[in-house]
Amino acid sequence: MQGGLHIDFETASPADLKRVGVHKYAEHPDTRTWGFSYRIDAGPVKTWLFGQPLPAEVTEHIASGGWTVAHGAMFERTIWNKVLRRNYPDAPQLTIEQQDCTLCRATTITLPAALDAAAAVMGVAHRKDMNGHTLMMKMAKPRRIDMFGNITWWDDPENIKHLMYVYCPQDVLAECDIDAVLPALSEEERRLWILDQKCNDRGLPLDITHAKRMVNLVELAKKRADRELRRLTNRELVKISQVQQIVAWLKKRHIAVGTMQKGDIPDLIWQAQMLDDKVAEQVITLRTEAGKNNVAKYAKMVEMTCADGRARGLLQFNGASTGRDAGRLLQPQNMTRLDYEKDGWVVRWLHQMLDDPRFDDDKILSAFEIVHGNALPWFGKAIRSFIKAEPGHKLVGGDFSNIEGRGNAWLAGEEWKLQAFRDFDAGIGPDLYKVSYARSFGKDVSEVDRQGRQVGKVQELSLGYQGGVQALLKMCRKEGANVRDMVLSVEAMTDAYTWDKVSIRYDASRDTANLSQQAWTALTIVVQSWRKAHPAIRQSWRDYQDAVLNAVSVPGTIVECAGGKVKYVYLGRYLYCQLPSGRIAVYVDPEIVTEKREFVNDDGEIYERWVHGLRFWGINSVTHKWSRQPLYGGLLTENLCQMIARDMLKFAEDNVTLFGYDVVLKVHDELLSHVRKEFGSPQDFGNIMLMKPTWAGDWPIAVQSWEDERYIK
C-alpha cells in the first residue's frame, strides 16, 4: 500500500524514550520536536522546522481524515497530538483510524521491526543514514541541565540542518520504499490493530502509591541480603550484586559455573546439592532471589506511569512471530503468576500493611522475614497485584485454560484427549493431568496420586512440541516440581525390563544436563510414555514437516495438513501458512538442507540417518538478531498452536469490546478489562470469551474468569 502522507518526527527530551515510552515521554513539559519530514503521495520529500507555520497541505490532509503512514504509528501520533499540538493548538487531531504502520506490517510477516533492518532484508533502494542516526541520538537529549533545571540543547544550526534536511528525509524515503513492497494488513487484522492501539492509548491503571513504597522495600531487602551474604561467607563475599565475585567463589568450591543467568541456576543448585554444600546452595538461592528482574518492575512502574496513574504503550501488536502481542517497557508478559488459592492471602496482607501507617518499611520487611524468610521472592510474586482498578471501577478478566494443549490435540485429531477435555469441561471427567499420567503409564485414573498428577502436569506442559528430557527438566524446574521425587516415583512403577532397556542407553558424555543414570532413565521413560500415549500428535510432527518440505520443493503447490485445517504454499521468498482462521502466517526464505539426525524408535533405541531438514530466516529468540533458524516438526507444531490460540484470543478481545468491556491488557491467553463496578460480571465475561468463531469447529475451549479490585487471579 503506497500513498497518503508519510511523516517522521525528530524530537528531544530530558526523558528517556526507551525507558518511559512515548506516552510518558510526550507528557514531559520539556519534550520538544525539532520538526518533521514528510511526503504526500509520490511528491517530493519536504521538511518543516519547529517555529515555522505548519504546512497547510499536511494539516488539511490530516483534518480531512487522509491516510497517514509512519514506521511506528503510535510514536508519530502521540508526538503530533501531545507535543506538536501543545505549541500549535489549532492543528487537527491525528486519529488511529487514519493511520497505517509499516513497522506493524513488517512484523506481521516476521521481518525485523527496525526500519533499517527491515529495509536491508527487503533490499529496497533507500536505507537509514547511520551517521545521521548518531547525530540524532545526541540531539535527542539535552546537552546539559544546570542546577536550576535550565536546559541547553544541541541547537547548533549545522547539526539541525543535517538532522532535518539529510537524516530525517532519508528515513521518509526508506519508509516509502518498504511501504511500496510490504503487503497491507487484511481488513480483519487492521481492525484488530486499531483495537490494539486503543488499548495501548487507554493504558493500564497502577497502584503507584504502593509501588513507590515497594521501590524502597526492595532496596532495603537487598541490603539485608548483602548482610546475609557476608554472614554466610565469613565476609569473603560482600554484595549480592557482585556476580563475578560470586562466580569465582563458587568455582573455588568446585561448582562448574560460567554465568548466573536464569537458565543456569537450577544446574548450579543441583551441583551444590550433589556436593552436599549447603552454604553454596544458600548463596546461589540468595543471589537468585535478590537478582530477579521482577522486583525491578516496581521502579519501572514509577518511572513510566503517566500523570493519571496509567502505564501506556505496553504491547506491540504482532510483536511475536506467531502474531501474539509482545510485551514492551514494563514487560507485562513475564510478570510472575500467583497461585491465588494458595498464596493470595500473602499479597492482600502486603497491601494491608502498605496501607497501615503503623507499618514503616522496616516493620513490613521484618514481618515478611519472620513469616516467610526471604521477602524478595514474595515481592516478585506480588507484582501483578499492583495493577489496580481506579475508584468506582473493577478489573474483570478471563483466561483460556490450556488452550495450546487443546489446540494441539484438535489440530492433530487426538480424539481420546479431545473427549477427555470435553468430559472435564462438562464436569463428568477427571483432572486432565491425571488423565495424561494414567494414559502414559497404563494406570487407572483413580489410582493417580499427587505425585502422579505432578508428572502428568510437566508432561503436558513440556512434551507436546517434540520436546525431550531437556524440555521436561526445564518444565520441572519452572513448575517447582521435585525431580528426585519424580525419578523415584517413575522408577517404582516401571518394570525392571523396561527400566533396564532404557537405562543401558545412558551415555554421560552426551548428557548436557549432568543427570545421573537413574534420573536420565526415569525422565526418558516419562518422555517415551507420553509419546506412546499420543500417537496422533506424534504423527502430526512428521506431517507438518513433510507438508512444508513438499511445499518448498514444488513452489506454487498448495499442501494441506491437519485434516485440511492448515495449508502451506511457497511463493517467491516466502512460505505462506494459511491457518484455520484464514489468517496468513509467513516464514522468510525457507530452504531445504540435508543433515544427519538422531532418532529414537518405539523401543527407545537411538539411530542416525540422513534426512532433509529445513531452515528459514527470522529473529532469534535468544540473540534477538536476524539469522537463519532451524524449522522442524516440533517448532511448526508450537507455532501452529500458538497461532490459533492467538486468533482465538483476538476473536474474544473483539467480542468483549463489543459488549462494553474496555480491554487494558493482554497476557498470552488472558484478557484483562477495566469497567465500572456496577457493569458486567465474571460469568458474563467468561461466556463472551467462550463464543467461538465458525472456523474453530469442535475445538473444546474453556475459560476461567474473575473480578477483583486488583490483578491477582
Image (cartoon, rainbow, N blue to C red):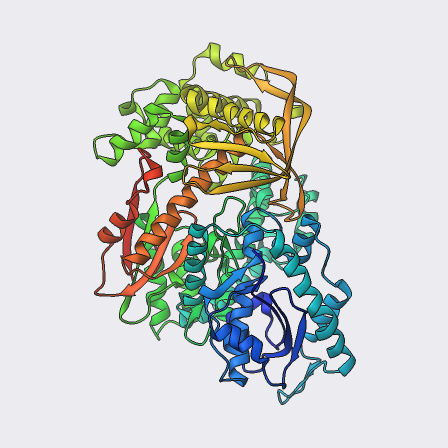
Residue 645 screen position, x and y as percent: 41, 42
Is 643 positioned to the left or the right of 675 in the image?
right
Is 219 positioned to the left or the right of 565 in the image?
right
Residue 152 screen position, x and y as percent: 69, 85
Is 548 positioned to the left or the right of 340 in the image?
right
In the image, what residue occupies the spot 39% across and 63% down? 387
In the image, what residue occupies the spot 47% across and 30% down? 463
Residue 238 visible in the picture: no
Along the viewing direction, whichever of 113 and 343 lies nearer the viewer: 113
Residue 630 visible in the picture: yes
Along the viewing direction, whichever of 180 and 402 lies nearer the viewer: 180
Point out the image quarter for the N terminus.
Answer: bottom right
Residue 122 screen position, x and y as percent: 67, 49
Number of marks present in the image shown: 0
Of all residues, the one furthest to the top in this rendering is 497
In the image, what residue occupies the spot 51% across and 67% down? 299
Is 257 positioned to the left or the right of 543 in the image?
right
Q: Quadrant of residue 157?
A: bottom right
Residue 676 screen position, x and y as percent: 26, 67
Q: Is residue 258 above or below residue 235?
A: above
In the image, what residue occupies the spot 23% across and 59% down? 680
Q: Is residue 44 above or below residue 156?
A: above
